[in-house]
Image (cartoon, rainbow, N blue to C red):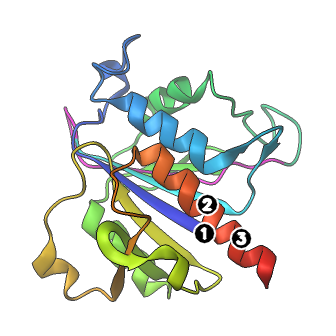
Amino acid sequence: MREFVYYSKTAPTSGSFIGEDLMKAGRLDIAIHTIIAAFFLSHSFRNDVKLHLVFEGPPTPPRHLELKPVTEGETNVDKIYLNKKNISDIIKKMLYKYKEGEKKEIFPGYFIERKSFLQVIKDLEKEGKEIYLLDKDGEDIRSITFSDNPVFVLGDHQGIPNLKKEFKRIKHKLVSIGKKTYFASQTVAIVNNEVDRQEESQ
């Protein structure tokens, strides 16, 4: 199982802050494109990905949304059908149904809670996951052999918080997909492809 942690300083933390214009809704459009890149293939859907979204926009940050869509069973009973058109509606409903003080499953495989970006990373490290921060100055992704449970950390157009001191206490590695700066969604697609290729060669 590969996992991604996507951080946004501006993405809204209440459903009431999400309107028709997703660019004005704290650049929620970037998060949605990232979700599409994480899970969708041409005529197929990935079952080997979990995505963590950490939103720190207004009005009540932070929010940690954990997505591992269930694909088996009857739609609207055992699973929620995820398509490119309804992603913003699902996020809005998750934010609306948040309950203070608990990790709540809103739909099968869709959880929301109050948890900071740094705490999400710490918890994943405690689970024994390998943490990789996407950084253009990191080690070339093609020179790394990943374990079965890698976690890739990236941010939106503003990047991730400057937590160098805090990250010194977390075992992690910087990894690069090249010297050019890509969109978050493109980065996820490239990482998915590289991990796919490693798995296929084993």
- Residue that extends furthest to the front in the rendered view of this protein: 179
Look at label 3 and name its amino acid: Arg
Circle 3 sits on which residue? 197
Circle 2 sits on which residue? 192
Q: Does label 2 or label 1 sit earlier along the sequence?
A: 1
Give the quadrant of residue 139.
Answer: bottom left
User: How far separated are the C-alphas under marks 2 and 3?
Assistant: 9 Å
- Placement of the C terminus among the 4 image quadrants: bottom right
Is residue 5 at all visible to an observer of this figure? yes
> Quick check: marks 2 and 1 in contact, CB under 8 Å?
yes
Residue 1 x %, y % = 66, 71
User: How far separated are the C-alphas under marks 2 and 1?
Assistant: 9 Å
The crowd level at tag 3 (other Cα within 10 Å; few <14, some 14-19, many 20+) is: few
In this view, the residue in front, 132 or 47, is 132
Circle 1 sits on which residue? 2
**Marks 2, 3: nearer the viewer:** 3
For the point 62% across and 21% down, the residue is 85
For the point 45% across and 67% down, the residue is 152
Give the quadrant of residue 194.
Answer: bottom right
Residue 65 x %, y % = 45, 49
Q: Does label 3 or label 1 sit earlier along the sequence?
A: 1
Chief secondary structure of the magenta portion = loop
Badge 1 element: strand
Question: In this picture, which residue range is highlighted in magenta?
Answer: 57-71
